[in-house]
Amino acid sequence: MKVPMRVLIFGGTFDPPHRGHAALLLAAAKKIRPDKILIVPAYQAPLKEAPQASSKDRLLMARLGILDPLPLRWRKICRLDAREAASKKKVFTVDTLSSLTGDLHFVCGQDSAVSFPKWRNPSRLKSLATWWYGARPGASARPPSHFRSVPGRFPSISSSEIRSKLALDQDCSQYLLPAVLSFIDKRRLYGKRMAARLSTTLSPSRYEHTLNVASLAESLARRWGADPVKARLAGLLHDAGRRYRPHELARYARRRRFALPERAIIIALDPMRLHAYV
């Protein structure tokens, strides 16, 4: 009787793919010893917010940050599977696994494993594959009992935290491989385009102030249950009007016919006050 091919599936949004993803896949490959490895970036994970980078960019970054760093032994049997990313819709893992053949092994991070009961048709999923997860330091919630732990300790890295740091022009070299960082910088993803514009239109001190306000706004939003991405954006833009000189602010206010109290007096005596409206 022919032994079925052992297939390791690594699914996720990879927005962006970080060092933790690369470490988990390598450890899983060493433990499971698959005949084939599939990296399957999602177009949009059903239980997560819409990705900030396009599926095309995330496919390219998954190659740079997860597939290419693998040792040659594993890289030769690994490929990117674009079926979900190219679908342009939410695809459920149960549908992807149902379309595959072989002895399937699915690996994911601890947070995803904990959310497994919320996935589409978990009982069917359990029968389709053997399930593995990488433990995250400090995580208290445990995955369902059918999950097996991939040996090793993996860095506690959150893609959402990385996206925040990138948008706030902070160093992410400890989280992202150089090739991924270079790609993000070149394409100006994750708010890099806005940060570049602000850094060239605001004074250095005003730009630093803007980043601090945006960071604080995001923290307050998380504390009080508001949208942290929108709060960060508001913080980044709150002083953008200060790129204009006083006479430019006055002209802008007249052209847009701003409805504000004592507009004529403000324009005449203190047009810098208009920057918030701008």
Image: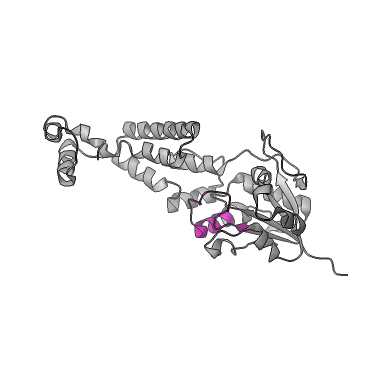
Q: Is residue 236 visible to us here?
A: yes
Nearer to the camera, 271 or 171: 271
Identify whether 159 is placed above or below 138: below
Magenta highlight on residue 121: no
In which quadrant will I find the C terminus? top left
Nearer to the camera, 229 or 212: 229
Rendered residue at 75%/57% (across/down) = 129
Residue 156, percent from left and from top: 62, 38
Residue 121, percent from left and from top: 68, 56
- Report whether 6 appears left or right of 197: right
Rendered residue at 68%/43% (across/down) = 114
Identify whether 220 is placed above or below 16: above
- Report whether 205 appears left or right of 145: left
Q: Is residue 76 visible to us here?
A: no
Applied colour scheme:
one colour
Residue 27, percent from left and from top: 72, 48
Q: In which quarter of the image is residue 246?
A: top left
Q: How many labels does the image show?
A: 0
Residue 264, percent from left and from top: 11, 35
Rendered residue at 57%/51% (across/down) = 14
Nearer to the camera, 91 or 29: 91
Instruction: Magenta stretch: give its range.
Output: 40-62
